[in-house]
Image (cartoon, helix red, strand yellow):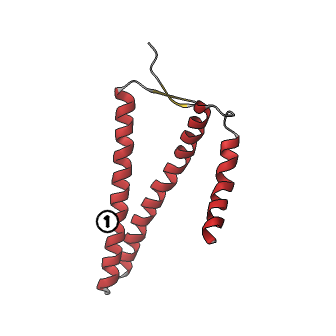
Amino acid sequence: MKNIYKILAAGAFVVPVLAGAQAGTIPGLLATFTSLINAVIPVIIALAGLVFLWGVFKFITAAGDEKARDAGRQYIIWGLVGLVIMFAFWGLVRILITTFGLQTGPSGLTPPTL
């Protein structure tokens, strides 16, 4: 029953975004999806940065407790892994956009002009 509430809550945030799209067109839906992804990516990167900083805080404050230092070390490692993966993927996308001459426009990526 709790899963239904979670789905309804997520839908309450997504439906207004979809309603603002051009009615029923694939480019409109793609533009909406692109804008939604562009809004979520900085939040995920910020969360990975916060995990890293939380690990640094835990590591420094647990001077005598070896288990707490190990927990802080794990937060640091996984925060860095998350940041490296996200920035590497972001760089790969940028390389592909530049290589194939794609341009970003109001509706996301547009094919190159001849």
- Asked whether residue 29 is in view, the answer is yes
Name, please, the residue furthest toward the front. 1
Is 61 above or below relative to 88?
A: below
- Asked whether residue 63 is in view, the answer is no
Is 10 above or below relative to 2?
A: above
Q: What element carries label 1?
A: helix
Q: Quadrant of the C terminus?
A: top left
Quadrant hosting residue 107: top right
Q: Provide residue 4's location: percent of width, then percent of height.
A: 64, 65
Residue receiving disc 1: 77
Residue at x 65% of width, y 55% of height: 11
Q: How many marks?
A: 1
Q: Nearer the viewer, residue 90 or 30?
A: 30
Horizontally, residue 11 falls left or right of residue 110, namely: right
Q: In which quarter of the image is the N terminus?
A: bottom right
Name, please, the residue furthest toward the bottom. 64
At label 1, which amino acid type do we have?
Ile
Residue at x 43% of width, y 70% of height: 54
Residue at x 31% of width, y 84% of height: 67
Quadrant hosting residue 75: bottom left
Q: Provide residue 87's location: percent of width, then percent of height.
A: 37, 48
Q: Provide residue 14's location: percent of width, then percent of height.
A: 64, 50
Is 45 above or below relative to 94?
A: below
Crowding near the residue tagged with mark 1, few <14, some 14–19, many ≥20 C-alpha atoms within 10 Å: some
Q: Nearer the viewer, residue 64 or 51?
A: 51
Horizontally, residue 27 falls left or right of residue 90, namely: right
Q: Provide residue 93's location: percent of width, then percent of height.
A: 38, 38
Is 86 above or below relative to 81?
A: above
Horizontally, residue 6 falls left or right of residue 56, namely: right
Residue at x 37% of width, y 25% of height: 100
Q: Nearer the viewer, residue 59 or 32?
A: 32
Q: Which of 11 and 98 is in front in this view?
A: 11
